[in-house]
Amino acid sequence: MNIKLIIFDFDGTIMDTKNTIIAAKQETLRQMGVDVADEQTCASTIGMSAKIGFQKLCPELSEDMIDLCMKKYREIFDETKKVVPPVLFPNMVETLNELKKKGIVCTIATSRGHNSLVEFLESMNIAKFFSYILAAEDTTLLKPNAEPVKKTLIDLSCSLENTLVVGDMPFDIIMGKNAGVYTCGVTYGVSDKKSLLEAGADWIIDSISDLLEIV
């Protein structure tokens, strides 16, 4: 195995946004006057697009109400992150730096919006490690569909056998498997080892620095 390209998930894999997202989603539901989902239920929607996440949390709401949820959520998230600031996971910068030294191309495929993603990457001074990013607006289909991986491979002219997807949610792993590339699940995000293995992960790691032993 000769990994030349790593496609990272963002939320729960690179950055710990869990508490910020949960707080913002619960406040959104509260302001919308609907039942407020518990922390675990809100956490289960992390990594999904905002629309799909709110459809899961509020299946009774109309399309227009879901759109309103999304708009309100983005506003509330921007305020919440000032009070509950997301942070990079331990050893993230050091690991990304080592991968760069090895000549491995690092990219991101996320369901987070482009502007929000870029803002986080720049504020944490890690944008320099990623030569290519795909956000929610950049593909027609999102995880677990293979499109984000396939688009990355085409645009970067990289082969399946040289590519690894790294993520904390089962649909990150399923996206990679659907595309035919190697996959690595991380247990420090939202999902546990069992669910990542059931999704078909080739490797499971407990710290991002363990990735260096794989590649």
Image (tube, rainbow, N blue to C red):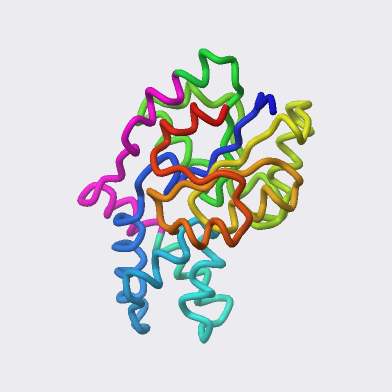
Q: Residue at x 50, y 46 (%)?
A: 204
Is 130 placed left or right of 162 in the picture?
left
Q: Position of residue 157 (x, y in %)?
A: 78, 26
Is 37 placed left or right of 196 in the picture?
left
- Front in this rendered view, residue 185 or 39: 185
Q: Which contiguous range is marked in magenta?
A: 74-97
User: Hey, which quadrant is residue 86 in on the image?
Assistant: top left
User: Hey, which quadrant is residue 43 in on the image?
Assistant: bottom left
Whether residue 88 is in magenta: the answer is yes
In the image, residue 97 sits, relative to residue 189, either above or below, namely above
Q: Position of residue 103 (x, y in %)?
A: 59, 15
Q: Residue furthest left?
A: 83
Q: Main secondary structure of the magenta part?
A: helix
In the image, residue 179 sits, relative to residue 97, either above or below, namely below
Q: Residue 129: in sight, yes or no?
A: yes
- Front in this rendered view, residue 50 or 67: 50
Q: Residue at x 40, y 44 (%)?
A: 206
Q: Position of residue 1 (x, y in %)?
A: 69, 28
